[in-house]
């Protein structure tokens, strides 16, 4: 198996992998980056660099919030208000970008 395919497989199956970084992701093809973005539920369009930034941001947010799935009330006591606000903005931005992509020109027509 070539190294790009091995890296892609590792990233799909191991979200905790140390290879999720700005040095390893550029080794993937644009097509593989698109697939990773779709699997993570984030927008899959854009340049290779845009996708890398988006994937790393999505992963970072996921890792921050993953430990609070059992008791979301702990989230408020673990982070300052400004940090929570930033995380909400980031997740809302990612969600809106996905929605815009999904609905295509619907949002443009509504303006």
Image (spheres, helix red, strand yellow):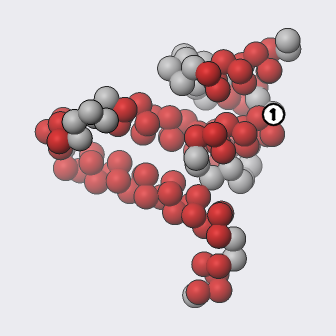
The residue positioned 71% from the left and 53% from the top of the image is 45
Residue 10 position (above or below residue 59): above
Query: Which residue is label 1 attached to?
Result: 29
What residue occupies the far top of the structure in this picture?
1
Q: Quadrant of the N terminus?
A: top right
Which of the 4 quarters of the picture holds residue 14? Answer: top right
* Residue 79 visible somewhere in the drawing: no
The residue positioned 72% from the left and 24% from the top of the image is 8
Coordinates of residue 7 in the picture (x, y in percent): 72, 19
Which of these two is toward me, 6 or 56? 6
Q: Is residue 31 left or right of residue 54?
A: right
Q: Secondary structure at mark 1?
A: loop
Coordinates of residue 71 in the picture (x, y in percent): 22, 36
Which of the 4 quarters of the picture holds residue 6? Answer: top right
Coordinates of residue 94 in the picture (x, y in percent): 51, 54
Q: Is residue 109 left or right of residue 83?
A: right
Residue 56 position (above or below residue 18): below
Coordinates of residue 33 in the picture (x, y in percent): 72, 38
Q: Is residue 59 left or right of residue 107?
A: left
Q: Quadrant of the C terminus?
A: bottom right
The residue positioned 58% from the left and 24% from the top of the image is 20
Q: Is residue 31 left or right of residue 111?
A: right
* Residue 86 visible somewhere in the drawing: yes
């Amino acid at each position: 198996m070539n190294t790009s395919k091995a890296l892609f497989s590792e990233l799909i199956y191991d979200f905790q992998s140390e290879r999720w970084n700005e040095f390893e992701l550029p080794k993937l093809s644009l097509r593989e980056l698109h697939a990773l973005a779709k699997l993570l539920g984030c927008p899959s369009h854009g340049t290779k660099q845009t996708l890398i930034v988006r994937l790393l941001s999505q992963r970072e947010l996921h890792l921050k919030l993953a430990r609070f799935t059992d008791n979301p009330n702990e989230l408020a006591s673990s982070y300052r208000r400004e940090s929570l606000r930033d995380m909400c903005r980031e997740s809302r931005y990612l969600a809106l970008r996905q929605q815009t992509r999904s609905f295509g020109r619907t949002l443009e027509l509504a303006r």
